[in-house]
């Protein structure tokens, strides 16, 4: 038995299969012109349409598809809330619907966010947490949110928003700083490496209001550092340190409010080495492996499996 998943997020085309134990996944990043900080939805949708046959062919070549597709899962929207919509997910929905119809396999739709969380649990070997409440941070280019996750019969996991950035998202701060430093978008891994070369220490007082945060000052401060001739290494470390301190303070406030629940990090920003080190040491947080932290279809395939058993 094999469960096929699709995810067409804003910057990655992804397809994956899950056999109940192991995931095999193929991805293709969307192309962003050098110096630009993102893509229009129409451009993202076009690139996904071009990429999907390539990604699926790579997947089928590796699998030598001889097993029956039991169910198909797809990320159909950013979050499992009313009104959540992005056009780029239409490419994945169309591909998943076509495969489902051709194979006579049921189609299960979930959210990009739920897929991130399920992939993180799988990768961290913590899949048993779907049976109990926990806190998940979804930290990426478009999202900086903390969620109270509980078991749900229909959605498998129900994610209730409990804290968020009120303005700029962590991934936006990282990518905008990286572009100012002439990096290729998305800039997370390159900025992480650059920050590791700085020996400077920064004392940060994060802007946290209750459980929510503000990150709008990070981009402006980074721009001033660059204009003042401060090193790229120090600028990178400042931005990462600020985000790390902010997530730490948010976690403290969330624990005060909801108690000490298991803590899981998902999303591309959670790949950052400084954030991982701090949150693991202080809170015993669980992190996905990098390929399951960044956008991926593994969660959609796992969702299809969980809906079928």
Image (cartoon, rainbow, N blue to C red):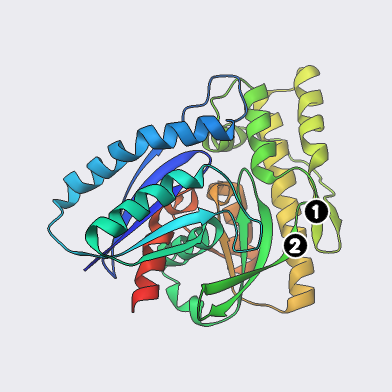
- Bin the neighbour count of mark 2 within 10 Å (Cα to Cα): few under 14, some 14-19, many 20 and up: many
Relative depth, front residue between 257 and 113: 113
Q: Which residue shows up at 23% across the image and 41% down it?
A: 57
User: What residue is shown with label 2?
Assistant: 163
The residue that label 1 is drawn on is: 213
Give the quadrant of the C terminus.
Answer: bottom left
Looking at the image, can residue 114 be seen? yes
Inter-mark Cα distance, 2 to 1: 8 Å
* Residue at 70% across, 37% down: 173
User: Which image quarter is the N terminus in?
Assistant: bottom left
Q: Dividing the picture into quarters, in which one does residue 261 lie?
A: bottom right
Q: Name the spot of residue 31 as percent of width and height, x first.
A: 47, 27
Q: Secondary structure at mark 1?
A: strand
* Total marks in image: 2
The answer to whether any part of residue 29 appears in the image is no
Is 296 or 264 nearer to us in this picture?
Answer: 296
The crowding category of the residue bearing disc 1, from other C-alpha atoms within 10 Å (few below 14, some 14 to 19, many at least 20), is many
The x, y position of residue 278, in whole percent, is: 63, 57
Question: In this rendering, is residue 107 above or below 290?
Answer: below
Sequence order check, earlier mark of 2 and 1: 2
- Element at label 2: strand
| Mark 2 and mark 1 residues within 8 Å of each other at the beta carbon | yes
- Tell me: 304 left or right of 39: left
* Viewer-nearest residue: 182 or 39: 39
Give the residue drawn at x 29%, y 70%: 20
Is 304 displayed left or right of 159 in the figure? left
Horizontal side of 163 relative to 296 (left or right) equals: right
Q: Position of residue 164 (x, y in %)?
A: 74, 57
């Amino acid at each position: 038995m094999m469960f096929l998943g699709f995810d067409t997020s804003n910057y990655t085309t992804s397809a994956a299969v899950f056999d109940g134990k192991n995931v095999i996944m193929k991805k293709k990043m969307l192309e962003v012109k050098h110096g630009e900080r993102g893509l229009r939805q129409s451009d993202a949708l076009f690139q996904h349409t071009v990429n999907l046959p390539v990604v699926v062919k790579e997947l089928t070549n590796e699998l030598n598809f001889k097993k029956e597709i039991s169910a198909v899962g797809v990320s159909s929207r950013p979050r499992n809330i009313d009104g959540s919509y992005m056009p780029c997910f239409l490419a994945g929905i169309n591909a998943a619907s076509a495969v489902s119809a051709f194979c006579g396999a049921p189609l299960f739709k979930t959210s990009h966010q739920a897929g991130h969380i399920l992939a993180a649990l799988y990768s961290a070997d913590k899949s048993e947490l779907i049976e109990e409440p926990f806190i998940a941070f979804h930290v990426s280019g478009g999202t900086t949110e903390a969620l109270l996750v509980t078991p749900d019969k229909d959605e498998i996991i129900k994610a209730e928003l409990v804290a968020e950035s009120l303005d700029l998202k962590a991934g936006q701060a990282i990518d905008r700083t990286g572009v100012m430093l002439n990096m290729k978008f998305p800039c997370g891994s390159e900025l992480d490496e650059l920050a590791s070369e700085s020996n400077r220490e920064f004392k940060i007082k994060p802007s946290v209001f209750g459980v929510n945060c503000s990150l709008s000052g990070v981009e402006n401060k980074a721009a001033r550092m660059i204009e003042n001739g401060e090193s790229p290494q120090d600028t990178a470390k400042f931005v990462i340190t600020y985000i790390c301190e902010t997530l730490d303070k948010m976690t403290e406030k969330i624990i005060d409010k909801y108690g000490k629940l298991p803590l899981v990090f998902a999303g591309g920003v959670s790949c950052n080495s400084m954030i991982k080190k701090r949150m693991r040491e202080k809170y015993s947080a669980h992190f996905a492996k990098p390929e399951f932290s960044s956008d991926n279809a593994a969660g959609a395939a796992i969702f299809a499996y969980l809906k079928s058993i």
